[in-house]
Image (spheres, helix red, strand yellow):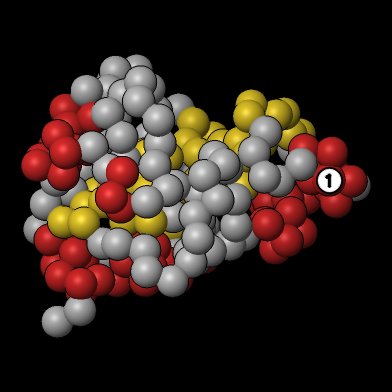
Amino acid sequence: MTKIQNAVNILKKGGVAIFPTDTVYGIGTLPEKKYVEKIYKIKKRDFSKKIIALISDKKILSELIDETDENMKKIENILEKYWPGELTVIFQANQNFTKNFDKNMETIGIRIPKNKTALEIIKKSGGVLLTTSANISGENAVTKAKSLSKELLKNVDAVVQNENTELTGNPSTIVKYENGKFSLLREGNVSFTEIMENFK
């Protein structure tokens, strides 16, 4: 059994796993409240801070968000260009999805990572993992497994190391997509100016 398969088996049973994304190491679990609460406890993270969904395929998107066909057509070329990649888009959430882990969650950030290890883990775990950076709240996010917090490692169920690709260390760019318009929440490796030029 590969380390990836091992992590997938643990995730499917409601475990919490650390794995590489394009940017930094992430900590993820299946979209269920009791599993997500574990991540917040392990990270000592404030419950008011949102968690994002990493997905393996754009086909899954419609199950997670509540958006008109017209607005989805408008954003199609942006998703085509930047997914998989370092762009997180915040959409209006489909509350049938978010109520499973946060009944007050009205918007959800979503990304398809391009890291092959992350994609394989997400795909084999069912296509959606809720994730945040693998660090104790307030500490720096990490790009190398050896820098992961000992306290974090003690409390998670699985760790998959990144053996082949370098993690950038820069967080993803976060944009909000609302009423067919973009607004920038955080600029990372993907430039907002470039997004807007491609959006026309």
Reply above or below: 161 against 26: below
Q: Does the image show residue 179?
A: no
Answer with left or right where residue 83 lies relative to residue 106.
right
Q: Residue at x 68, y 51 (%)?
A: 72
Answer with left or right where residue 40 lies relative to residue 114.
left
Viewer-proximal residue, 7 or 103? Answer: 7
Q: Residue at x 14, y 34 (%)?
A: 151
Q: Secondary structure at mark 1?
A: helix
In the image as oriented, which residue stretches furthest toward the front? 146
Answer with left or right where residue 6 lies relative to residue 131.
left
* Residue bearing the label numbered 1: 194
Answer with left or right where residue 165 lies relative to residue 88.
left
Q: Residue at x 83, y 45 (%)?
A: 194
Image quadrant occupied by the N terminus: bottom left
Reply above or below: 150 against 124: above
Splitting the image into 4 quarters, where does residue 148 fall?
A: top left
Dot 1 surroundings within 10 Å: few (below 14), some, or many (20 or more)?
A: few
Viewer-proximal residue, 23 or 78? Answer: 23
